[in-house]
Image (cartoon, rainbow, N blue to C red):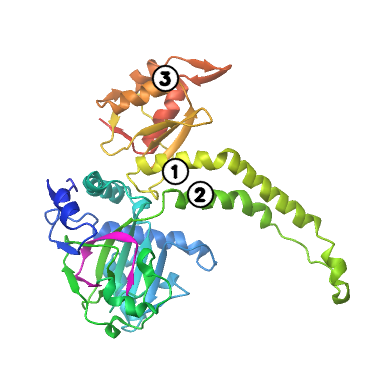
Amino acid sequence: MSFQPPTGFWKSFAREVWGKQPRVFKKVFGGELLASPEELFRVASEETVRYAPTAGAWMRPRPSRVAIERGQLMVQLPYMPRQEDGSFEGWARRMRQETKGQSFCFHMSGLQSRSNLIFERYRQFTDGLFQEIGLPPWRIDSDIFAGDYRETPFGVHKDVTGNFAFIAEGHKRMLLWTYESLLPYTKGGLDPESLDFTLQIRSFTELPPPAMALEGEPGDLFYWPGSFWHCAEGTGGLSVTNNLAIYLNTSPLVDSMPDKVFEAVLPPLEEDMSFTAYEPARRQELAGALPESLRDSTRRAVEGLKRLVDGGLEREMELSWLRYVSGSGFLQVPPPDSGAVLDEARAMKLATHAGLVWRKLASGELAVAANGNVTCFPESRGLVELLQRLSGGGSHRVGALLDEAVEERQGGSVVWSRERMRDVLTALVAKRALVGA
């Protein structure tokens, strides 16, 4: 089953709909679901298992949250979907009992990084769109919304994204207002046009009637531009959607660069310091007694930044670009499979949407990316020839490829050999770029 829309769909969509107007597309895949409720529930219940060991810790923003009525819970774990619920319907039954009839919503981001199946289908879906409009400047993300709620818990809002919503279960209604119509409700502070922005109101009932309402059933697809304010309205039962957000500003480096800076700077700054002896009458003396531990941690943080500026940032830029191109604009992707095994007797081929690309780095390495994951190897003629051969199509028996490897050396080091080729092929199998022919 292909999840590419019918021929001509994206051409007319780019011309008439993208960035211009909301739209409902009925049964765009002939009634098939891009993501089934079962697959979405599997991802959601696995998120609960991942969340549980650190549930009480205050950490960086988590990918999931639960709200009851309009409030996000501080204690979330008891209300998240569990494997023993069996389905979203089972989770909803439990929630109705535990909340005594209050509305409830589960939201999770980064869906595409938790499901190889959904990631592959999203790329099938978006390839034709990006041929018309180009790859987005930043990234693409995907969410799960599941629950029985009167209105979106985080209110009427707008995102700087082009938005698709795939209805997986239940009836869905999305209310939309034009950008200009709700500007009087932004309180006149920041200009929200280029911002994600939530109106500070209690309910959408305080607003003028929406410009339109999108309504759909399982298999239907919503689209609305980032300029539209929106809020889901409950329909009296459980609904489950997976939403695809195409970011319209910044760059692929927004996700990776801050992490690299934190990795370089934070470790020495997070080291514990002892209490400092203190006498109020001797403050001036204390001001001149800068602790050596503070001076040392600052020096090491500066050295970390210098190393980053001297090469690490440029390298990360190149690797981010490869991940971005290989992942078709997705930067959060499923990780490589652990424990991948290469079978020499097997014939293999490049997967249709592997996105295999490579690039020589300033370090002299060759970075090889597939399905949004990247690995670096020593550059060699044999490696480039192998990648070109795989990209050319056809099936290849693994053992025959390995037998053709000719050792190469540079500066006394082996840069290509049978074992090096095995490492490369195994990495491509782990990235799901090589599949059985």
- Label whose residue precedes the other's in the sequence (2 or 3): 2
> In the rendered image, is residue 81 in sight?
no
- Label whose residue precedes the other's in the sequence (1 or 3): 1
Q: Is residue 103 above or below residue 312?
A: below
Is 157 a magenta residue?
A: yes
Q: Which residue is mark 1?
A: 320
**How many residues crowd mark 2 within 10 Å: few (<14), some (14–19), many (20+)?**
some
Q: What percent of the width, then of the height, locates residue 287?
A: 82, 66
Asked if the residue at tag 3 contacts the one at tag 2, i.e. Cβ–Cβ closer than 8 Å, the answer is no
Q: Which residues are magenta?
A: 156-177
Magenta span main SS: strand
Q: Quadrant of residue 155?
A: bottom left
Q: CA distance from mark 1 to mark 3?
A: 25 Å
* Residue appearing at x 23%, y 43% in the figure: 131
- The kind of residue on which mark 2 rests is Met
- The kind of residue on which mark 1 rests is Ser
Q: Quadrant of residue 381?
A: top left
